[in-house]
Image (cartoon, grey):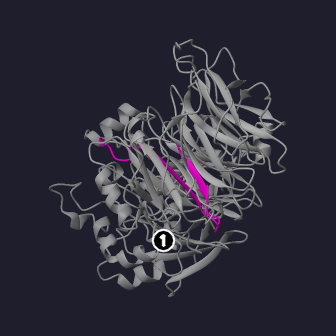
């Protein structure tokens, strides 16, 4: 089964162990709600009406302040109206707006919108958002990010929450260095509100921007809190009396550390919580992320099931005050602002997703998981002898791109399969162990090995299996006859064979295009001979067949000219194809005769497979990129590749088989 828009990869996060998916490059999920040249648009809030399709989105023209803009979608966030008329007073908004649906004790429904600082003001719509009243104070008090959230406490009764640091709670307020979270109550369907009362405070940290979630049994609320001093993780506290009193806030796991937590329950009862990532050691620090887990995880302080990056923010941590809605078909729609394009002002973006699809990307139910352990050409990045900016910058930053390699994990037996023995084998096996939580492997770091051919980036790592290093014992190593002869008859590889450190499993010679075998019980591998520069051995590509999906691995091949039928055969029945992307268009090697290096250009592959990519977005993923390939870092090229339905393989990404 082909997963639509599979731009996801699994990331190593040092501060937590749960998987993390990256959807940042998945443009097919993304909707631009609003954008204006040279104008900052930020901090949106959304509300879904009872029809399950109409969504209002409101946001300021400025960073947390400025004229409020209102737009509407009537198809669940897929398309958006022009900017709608708003009351004149909305142009005087001083802070982020927040919009909520409420119902009075007689069943009358309305929408209410808050605008904060001093005083907190409110606008009301009694006709499902068609018209709005002017902003008017709800009392002689103010606050920050009001109202951050609201809960229903009885028929027509609500409690709303905000915070303040002393500056806005009163007209003559001043900074105190202390943050308090306040609640106000309404008994008339949100039309009038009580004086504020403190519900959460700790003197040594800055707790703010509460997001509230009701337990599935309806008996307990959890309040998730931003920690603005950045001394500790985000915090959480609980109420069992409908928000009247709250437990002492305590730290949450790093997996939930962030700003402005908002979310919904999915159809299966799991929580989807969106926020700005502020865990400094996270790969996605400062980006728009989300967490998937359960209310029980919140109660017990568990890390949750997984996290995901929704969009890559390119300017510090300025993004992600999200609105989150659950549509009737189970789709989650979430919207926020961010610096989505380098050097441009932030704008409003929406994303559609569902947890079932994310589960498939993470291979939650698959027995076999396939991981990308490297995506570079034989020498990796940085590349020995290269003094170009691509490698000099990598040396300065510590960036490491390993040579092309896959790893497969059998979750039933714990067995590990490595495809290619690259010069970076130690780092790649360590990565595979970390991704699969493998322990106590000792001198049998993996259970089987597949090699494609005898070029250094694909077999030279075998040297580490010798008695001077791992001294492995009879690791099944699957090769063609010619590759087997090369290893058997040439030192130092022959010593691995004679000492039984590798046990060569030779593919039978056959006239058939391919041969099938099972290096691990339950997993079928199909080897295809492919044309390449074969000085010492022939070259093969592999199809990896699982119960649910098939992955193609062809890191080295000659150009597609005269091999169109082979290309068609290789792609037949494939869900994800990792294909030779050594060179983008030849610009990487000025002055060189490219006939001597006959890899297919990525531009040629994309041209040939444009229809396939259109029908199977994200299925074709380039791997084995030369260190000079601009697709490693050129933002415009990466954007074009994604727009055309292709992807660049990412180190650590996982596919369920």
Viewport quadrant of the C terminus: bottom right
Viewport quadrant of the N terminus: bottom right
User: Is residue 489 shown to the viewer in this render?
Assistant: yes
Indicate whether 347 appears above or below 615: above
Q: Residue at x 25, y 62 (%)?
A: 585
Q: Residue at x 43, y 55 (%)?
A: 71
Of residues 295 and 358, the one drawn nearer to the viewer in this rendering: 295
Residue 307, magenta (yes or no):
no
Q: Helix, strand or loop at disc 1?
A: strand
- Expressed as whole percent of the image width and height from the top left, the position of residue 177 reads 57, 13
User: Viewed as shown, does residue 15 lie left or right of 621?
Assistant: right
- In this rendering, the count of numbered labels is 1
Q: Residue at x 71, y 58 (%)?
A: 415
User: Is residue 491 shown to the viewer in this render?
Assistant: no
Indicate whether 5 appears above or below 39: below
Residue lying furthest left in this view?
591
- Expressed as whole percent of the image width and height from the top left, the position of residue 503 reads 64, 62
Residue 338, magenta (yes or no):
yes
- Expressed as whole percent of the image width and height from the top left, the position of residue 356 reads 66, 64
Of residues 547 and 418, the one drawn nearer to the viewer in this rendering: 547
Provide the residue span drawn in magenta. Answer: 321-344
Indicate whether 268 appears above or below 184: below
* Label 1 neighbour load within 10 Å: few <14, some 14-19, many 20+: many
Of residues 96 and 576, the one drawn nearer to the viewer in this rendering: 96
Which residue position holds label 1?
Answer: 541
Residue lying furthest bottom in this view?
511
- Expressed as whole percent of the image width and height from the top left, the position of residue 595 reads 22, 68
Indicate whether 133 appears above or below 498: above
Of residues 258 and 476, the one drawn nearer to the viewer in this rendering: 258
């Amino acid at each position: 089964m082909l997963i639509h828009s599979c731009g996801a990869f699994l990331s190593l996060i040092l501060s937590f162990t749960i998987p993390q998916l990256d959807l940042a490059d998945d443009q097919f999920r993304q909707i631009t709600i609003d954008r204006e040249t040279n104008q900052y648009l930020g901090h949106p809030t959304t509300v879904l009406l009872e029809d399950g399709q109409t969504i209002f989105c409101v946001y300021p023209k400025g960073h947390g302040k400025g004229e409020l803009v209102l737009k509407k979608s009537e198809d669940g966030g897929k398309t958006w109206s022009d900017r709608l008329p708003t009351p004149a007073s909305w142009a005087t908004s001083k802070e982020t707006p927040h919009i909520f649906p409420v119902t009075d004790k007689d069943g009358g429904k309305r929408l209410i919108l808050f605008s904060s600082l001093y005083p907190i003001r409110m606008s009301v719509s009694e006709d499902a958002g068609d018209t709005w009243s002017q902003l008017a104070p709800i009392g002689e008090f103010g606050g920050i990010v009001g109202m951050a959230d609201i809960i229903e406490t009885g028929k027509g009764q609500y409690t709303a929450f905000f915070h303040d640091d002393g500056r806005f709670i009163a007209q003559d307020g001043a900074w105190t260095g202390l943050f308090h979270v306040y609640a106000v109550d309404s008994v008339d369907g949100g039309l009038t509100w009580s004086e504020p009362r403190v519900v959460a405070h700790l003197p040594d940290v800055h707790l703010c921007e509460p997001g509230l979630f009701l337990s599935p049994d309806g008996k307990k609320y959890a309040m998730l809190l931003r920690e603005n001093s950045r001394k500790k993780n985000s915090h959480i506290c609980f109420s069992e009396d409908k928000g009247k009193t709250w437990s002492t806030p305590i730290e949450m796991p790093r997996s939930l550390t962030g700003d402005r937590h908002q979310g919904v329950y999915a159809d299966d009862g799991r929580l989807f919580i969106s926020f700005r990532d502020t865990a400094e050691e996270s790969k996605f620090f400062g980006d728009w992320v989300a967490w998937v887990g359960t209310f029980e995880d919140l109660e017990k302080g568990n890390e949750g099931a997984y996290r995901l990056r929704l969009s890559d923010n390119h300017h510090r941590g300025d993004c992600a005050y999200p609105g989150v809605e659950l549509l009737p078909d189970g789709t989650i729609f979430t919207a926020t602002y961010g610096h989505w394009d380098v050097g441009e002002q932030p704008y409003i973006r929406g994303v559609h997703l569902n947890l079932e699809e994310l589960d498939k990307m993470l291979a939650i139910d698959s027995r076999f998981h396939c991981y990308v352990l490297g995506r570079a050409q034989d020498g990796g990045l940085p590349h020995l002898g290269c003094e170009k900016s691509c490698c000099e910058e990598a040396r300065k930053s510590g960036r490491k791109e390993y040579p092309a390699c896959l790893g497969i994990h059998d979750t039933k037996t714990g067995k590990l399969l490595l495809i290619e023995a690259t010069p970076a084998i130690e780092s790649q096996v360590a990565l595979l162990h970390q991704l699969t939580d493998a322990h106590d492997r000792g001198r049998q770091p993996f259970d089987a090995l597949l090699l494609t051919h005898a070029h250094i980036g694909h077999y030279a790592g075998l040297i580490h299996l010798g008695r001077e290093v791992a001294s492995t014992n009879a690791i099944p190593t699957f090769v063609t006859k010619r590759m087997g002869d090369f290893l058997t008859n040439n030192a130092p590889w022959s010593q691995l064979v004679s000492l039984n450190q590798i046990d060569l499993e030779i593919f039978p010679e056959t006239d058939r295009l391919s041969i099938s075998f099972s290096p691990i019980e339950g997993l079928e591998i199909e080897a295809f001979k492919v044309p390449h520069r074969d000085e010492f051995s022939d070259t093969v590509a592999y199809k990896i067949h699982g119960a649910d999906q098939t992955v193609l691995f062809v890191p080295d091949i000659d150009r597609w000219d005269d091999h169109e039928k082979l290309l068609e055969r290789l792609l037949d029945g494939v869900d994800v194809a990792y294909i030779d992307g050594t060179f983008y268009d030849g610009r990487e090697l000025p002055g060189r005769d490219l006939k001597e290096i006959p890899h297919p250009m990525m531009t040629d592959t994309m041209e040939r497979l444009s229809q396939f990519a259109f029908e199977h977005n994200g299925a074709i993923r380039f791997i084995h990129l030369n260190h000079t390939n601009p697709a490693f870092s050129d933002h415009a090229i990466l954007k074009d590749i994604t727009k055309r339905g292709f992807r660049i393989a990412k180190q650590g990404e996982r596919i369920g088989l």
